[in-house]
Amino acid sequence: MRILVTGGAGYIGSHTCVELLSAGHEVVVVDSLANSSAVALTRVEKIAGRSLFFRQVDINEKAALKSVFDEFAFDSVIHFAGLKAVGESVEQPLYYYRNNFCGTVNLLEVMESYAVRRMVFSSSATVYGEADSVPIPEQSSLSATNPYGRSKLMIEEMLGDLVRARPNWNIDVLRYFNPVGAHESGLIGEDPAGIPNNLMPFIAQVAVGKLDRLNVFGEDWETPDGTGVRDYIHVVDLAKGHLCALETVKETGGLRVYNLGTGTGSSVHEVRKAFEKAAARAIPFEVLGRRPGDVAQCFADVSKVERELGWKATYDLDAMCQDAWRWQSLNPDGYSKV
Ligand code: NAD
Ligand code: WQD
């Protein structure tokens, strides 16, 4: 298949490009490089031993996007492009709605005009808001607690409307839980701008000496050790989930929704200790108050994706930490010092 990967230079996109190329697909990446580096794509080619096509295009630029569709006939689109910083979305909601929501409208319009009606969309467990119970199945009630999450929810609802109006569209919505880790080669990984917001990259930067200590956001949650529990999933497992979705496409069209997680929750202290083992060093920490907007526990019910796509996560927390550490220690400044 020839596949357009929007946001393919980013963290999850680059790992997915490796899997797509390795499975023999032709890959065209469109990325504005708003939150990524083209170096990631050279590394992807090195790992896969195959080339891809890259066009530096913002999906909000319709004419530029169309020119990519003029150049290549696509079988399918995997749509990763989007901004993802929750705090920034609270500060700059219109930027997030323009980029994530309007960008997706633009992309869908261009796809329709070129009769490309197959999309795999990156959604997030954030659409479950404050879930009533765990593990969380796909049919749980949905809500948003910030503009980033609302932009994902709005896109999901728009995709539902589109498929109802145009039943020949084929759309998979994949709700990722907490993607972590890196490719085992140590060549590609997560490269956050500035101080990381998320737990695993923050711990990795403490381990490599760029940050002094981990701030643990609350030890008074209703969880076994009092710290927040999340469903961390290795980014390579996540990438493979996209291939499973592509390869099990329904003939009839329609919209499918799947959780991509391991089905198991880990606490902040469990992640910290697993990372200490992987990096063979202590991770100093301090317990602070709760972070606004956090929930106690969030982990996936993965029975639907296992049953229908035959996909199951394979990497455990130790492997996630070992791979994250290899990436961080080999590339202490990410892609910027290459
Ligand atoms: P990332 O920032 O590393 O990758 C996103 C890529 O999209 C970047 O390369 C960025 O430059 C590009 N991009 C952003 N806006 C664009 C635009 N208008 N036009 C073209 N390119 C644009 O993030 P990621 O972690 O790889 O996330 C990929 C997708 O998965 C995002 O949609 C994100 O919301 C979603 N997601 C991520 C997580 C997570 O924790 N990483 C969890 C759930 C869902
Ligand atoms: C995990 C746990 C924190 C940092 C976020 C987004 C979500 C999704 C995935 C895109 C929590 C604790 C964290 C730190 C800490 N992204 N923590 N110290 O909040 O589950 O999800 O990323 O869709 O939308 O909200 O992930 O890694 O930030 O936090 O104690 O420095 O680690 O309180 O319990 P989160 P996270």
Image (tube, helix red, strand yellow):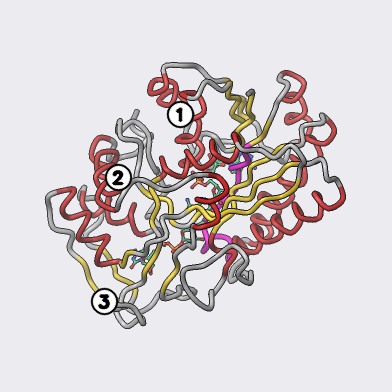
Residue at mark 1:
18
- Whether residue 223 is in magenta: the answer is no
Q: Which amino acid is tagged 3?
A: Asp
The quarter of the rendered structure image containing the C terminus is top left
* Of the pair 282 and 231, the residue shown nearer to us: 231
The residue at the point 46 percent across, 24 percent down is: 22
In the displayed structure, would residue 100 be above or below residue 136?
above
Residue at the far right in the pictured view: 165
Task: Identify the image quadrant of residue 28.
Answer: top right
Q: Which amino acid is tagged 1?
A: Val
In the displayed structure, would residue 224 be above or below residue 32?
below
Q: Label 3's element?
A: loop
The residue at the point 78 percent across, 35 percent down is: 111
Q: Position of residue 154 (x, y in %)?
A: 71, 60
| Dot 3 and dot 2 residues touching (CB under 8 Å) | no
* Of the pair 31 and 262, the residue shown nearer to us: 262
Magenta segment boundaries in residue numbering: 78-90
Q: Position of residue 82 (x, y in %)?
A: 60, 47
The quarter of the rendered structure image containing the N terminus is top right
Q: In whole angstroms, how far apart are the C-alphas of marks 3 and 2?
A: 24 Å
Q: In whole angstroms, how far apart are the C-alphas of marks 2 and 1?
A: 17 Å
| Dot 2 and dot 1 residues touching (CB under 8 Å) | no
